[in-house]
């Protein structure tokens, strides 16, 4: 059966699950591109049985990528730069997935301006070792609830896709107030990057699996960013099914993921790393002493 999708002709042959090659994918979030690749069968079409690994924090995630537990990791590109240049870790970036996945600073429902946060504790990204209080899903829940598990009040934090849009559908008394978007201050920004270890890349068998995984993700990304009614309908259903969201929330997530400013797009649409975006993220992190020496 022949499908023509975003300029690609893909032959989807019936394959037994046993014939698929196992592949370990790790990420902080299940993005729209991944949702489409998984739900629409692109991984299967490339002969892959992809296992998604939700990572708890960046320190753990990059250690697992280095020891080979993950075939590929999507994480922020500045972490790669820090670990590669300042800690001499053998990590390699294979491409850029997005330009900052709907990154915002959000406050609880009672905070409407930055001035109200003066003197109050925040749960934010650590400049040197990833998230200080768990990954984004945990921080999102803490923000909506208003407290940490120990009872400490939560006033604000950084949110990303899919939590930024998800939060805007909540009732008014729970809905996080978005005080600022990253792109209000810095643009373009290079954010989530496909990362693997040099050891994995140097293994010919693993390298072939990486090629097929990236091909599946590229096809899904082209599908996501092709403005056709049929594509949009299927993309919305894939996002909704993958994240277990309503159609209303899925629509908001789709709009966030296809934003040309902060969505799952890259220069040329082919996972090319944005040089200016990289320089911008290095500059921002460097201003806060975020690179280990």
Image (tube, rainbow, N blue to C red):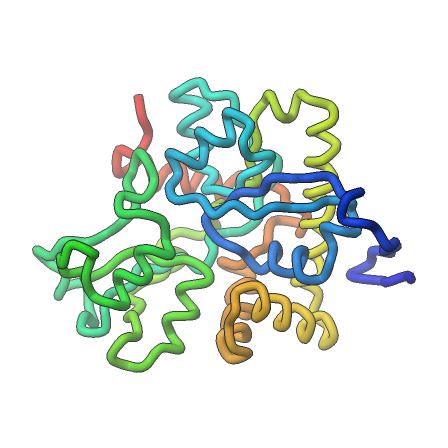
Toward which corner of the image does residue 247 lie, by quadrant?
bottom right
Furthest-left residue in view?
119
In the foreground, 75 or 12: 12
The correct choice, above or below, for 257 with respect to 192 in the image is below
**Spot occupied by residue 145 in the image (x, y as percentages of width and height):** 24, 67
Name the image quarter holding the N terminus: bottom right
Q: From the viewer's perspective, is 60 left or right of 70?
A: left
Residue at the (61%, 54%) spot, across then down: 34
In the foreground, 138 or 236: 138
Residue at the (76%, 48%) spot, across then down: 17
Residue at the (57%, 31%) spot, across then down: 196
Residue at the (74%, 27%) spot, across then down: 205
Name the image quarter holding the C terminus: top left
Q: From the viewer's perspective, is 280 left or right of 227?
A: left
Q: From the viewer's perspective, is 57 left or right of 80?
A: left
**Spot occupied by residue 194 in the image (x, y as percentages of width and height):** 57, 40
The correct choice, above or below, for 108 with respect to 246 in the image is above
Toward which corner of the image does residue 178 lie, by quadrant?
bottom left
């Amino acid at each position: 059966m022949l499908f023509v999708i975003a300029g690609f002709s893909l032959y989807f042959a019936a394959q037994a699950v046993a014939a698929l090659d196992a592949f370990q994918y790790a990420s902080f979030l299940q993005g729209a591109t991944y949702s489409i690749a998984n739900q629409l069968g692109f991984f299967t079409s490339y002969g892959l049985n992809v296992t998604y690994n939700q990572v708890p924090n960046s320190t753990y995630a990059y250690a697992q990528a280095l020891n080979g537990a993950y075939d590929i990791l999507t994480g922020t590109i500045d972490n790669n730069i820090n670990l590669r240049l300042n800690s001499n870790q053998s990590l390699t970036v294979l491409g850029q997935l997005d330009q900052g996945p709907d990154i915002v600073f959000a406050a609880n429902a009672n905070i409407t301006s930055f001035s109200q946060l003066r003197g109050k504790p925040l749960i934010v990204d650590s400049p040197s070792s990833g998230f200080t209080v768990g990954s984004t899903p945990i921080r999102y829940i803490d923000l909506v609830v208003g407290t940490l598990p120990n009872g400490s009040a939560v006033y604000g934090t950084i949110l990303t896709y899919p939590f930024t849009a998800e939060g805007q559908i909540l009732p008014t008394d729970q809905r996080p107030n978005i005080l600022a978007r990253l792109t209000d201050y810095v643009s373009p920004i290079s954010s989530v990057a496909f990362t693997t270890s040099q050891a994995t890349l140097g293994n010919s068998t693993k390298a072939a699996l990486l090629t097929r995984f990236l091909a599946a993700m590229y096809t899904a990304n082209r599908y996501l960013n092709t403005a056709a009614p049929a594509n949009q309908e299927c993309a919305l259903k894939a996002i909704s099914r993958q994240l277990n969201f309503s159609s209303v929330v899925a629509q908001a997530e789709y709009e966030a993921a296809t934003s040309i400013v902060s969505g799952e797009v890259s220069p040329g649409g082919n996972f090319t790393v944005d040089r200016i975006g990289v320089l911008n993220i290095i500059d921002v992190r460097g201003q806060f002493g975020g690179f280990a020496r």
